């Protein structure tokens, strides 16, 4: 495989209340052009649903690419994959979920009571609720001190979006259910789940995505893919996209 063959564009979509640039340590050596997309005010104000965000991004990035979504961004990527087979050549989810809130036949989601309590916190004091959520991104890290140090600059910058956009994003999390979509998606997909995630429970044993999807639980990984988990994520993504080992160098 030569350098030209490995230059595949990558579209990376961040999650609720986070900057997609937090994933740069995972993708900054990707052998091809990379587009980082945060669910910012510009996107949230022009779109009324996850599907509308997906449609907008498909228009903006028409070239065949690998798409990766983190947390809520995984739902955006999966929606895009279901609507743009030619543009989304392969899909990757990081700490993703077809449904966020627990419900019938979906025990892996956040309980409805916990979700509503958090939604109330956002409505009362969005900044405080946002900071609390950021701490959950690294809860359970084996290198807690280093994780807190890496998170500190992102906390100092404050929320990427307005209180209104945070609330709108929660509305989408509360209503979006993509289980049928994930089960039938004909696009090759890699689901990287986090073994230590306290935001999203691992669903690999309770839900079966499409037959051409691969599900991997990454040891030691929390909701934010970082630290020691990066090496495993690198290896899994490269094998999935290229079919064999290659180096992430340009």
Image: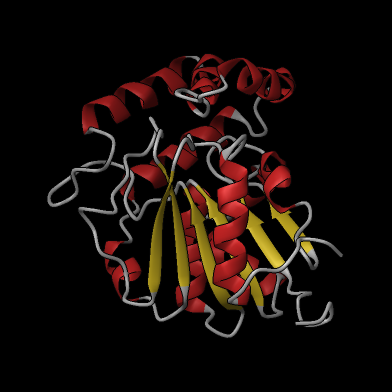
**For this view, does 232 lie left or right of residue 24?**
left
As drawn, the residue found furthest toward the right would be 250
> Can residue 76 be seen from the camera position used here?
yes
Residue 87 is situated, as x and y percent measured from the top left of the image, at 61, 79
Q: Quick check: 41 above or below 2? A: above
| Front position in the image: 30 or 34 | 30
Q: Quick check: 145 above or below 188? A: above
| Front position in the image: 81 or 218 | 218
The quadrant in which the C terminus is found is: bottom right
Which residue is drawn at the image coordinates 53% and 34% (left, top)? Answer: 166
**For this view, does 213 lie left or right of residue 233?**
left
The quadrant in which the N terminus is found is: bottom right
Which residue is drawn at the image coordinates 70% and 26% (left, top)? Answer: 154
Residue 177 is situated, as x and y percent measured from the top left of the image, at 30, 56
As drawn, the residue found furthest toward the bottom would be 86
| Front position in the image: 63 or 58 | 63
Which residue is drawn at the image coordinates 78% and 66% (left, top)? Answer: 31
As drawn, the residue found furthest toward the left would be 104
| Front position in the image: 144 or 124 | 144
Q: Quick check: 124 above or below 214? A: above
**For this view, does 26 lie left or right of residue 166?**
right
Question: Can you tell which quarter of the image residue 120 is in?
Answer: top left
Residue 228 is situated, as x and y percent measured from the top left of the image, at 59, 37
Scheme of colours in the image? secondary structure
Number of callouts: 0
Which residue is drawn at the image coordinates 31% and 76% (left, top)? Answer: 211
> Can residue 56 be seen from the camera position used here?
no
Residue 79 is situated, as x and y percent measured from the top left of the image, at 46, 66
As drawn, the residue found furthest toward the front would be 245
**For this view, does 151 lie left or right of residue 174?**
right
């Amino acid at each position: 495989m030569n350098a030209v063959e490995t230059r595949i564009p990558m579209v990376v979509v961040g999650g609720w209340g986070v900057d997609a640039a937090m994933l740069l340590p995972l993708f900054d050596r990707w052998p091809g052009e990379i587009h980082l997309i945060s669910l910012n005010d510009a996107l949230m104000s022009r779109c009324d649903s996850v599907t509308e965000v997906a449609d907008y991004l498909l228009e903006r990035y028409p070239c065949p690419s690998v798409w990766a979504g983190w947390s809520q961004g995984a739902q955006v990527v999966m929606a895009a994959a279901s609507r743009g087979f030619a543009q989304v050549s392969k899909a990757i989810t990081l700490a993703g979920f077809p449904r966020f809130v627990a419900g019938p036949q979906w025990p892996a989601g956040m309980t409805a009571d916990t979700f509503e309590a958090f939604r109330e916190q956002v409505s009362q004091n969005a900044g405080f609720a946002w900071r609390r959520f950021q701490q959950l991104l690294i809860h359970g890290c084996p290198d807690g001190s280093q994780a807190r140090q890496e998170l500190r600059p992102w906390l100092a910058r404050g929320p990427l979006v307005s209180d209104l956009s945070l609330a709108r994003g929660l509305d989408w999390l509360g209503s979006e259910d993509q289980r049928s979509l994930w089960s039938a998606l004909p696009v090759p997909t890699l689901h990287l789940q986090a073994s230590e995630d306290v935001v999203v429970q691992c669903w690999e044993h309770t839900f079966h995505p499409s037959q051409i999807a691969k599900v991997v639980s990454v040891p030691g990984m929390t909701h934010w893919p970082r630290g020691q988990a990066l090496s495993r994520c690198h290896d899994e993504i490269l094998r999935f996209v290229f079919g064999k080992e290659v180096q992430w160098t340009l």
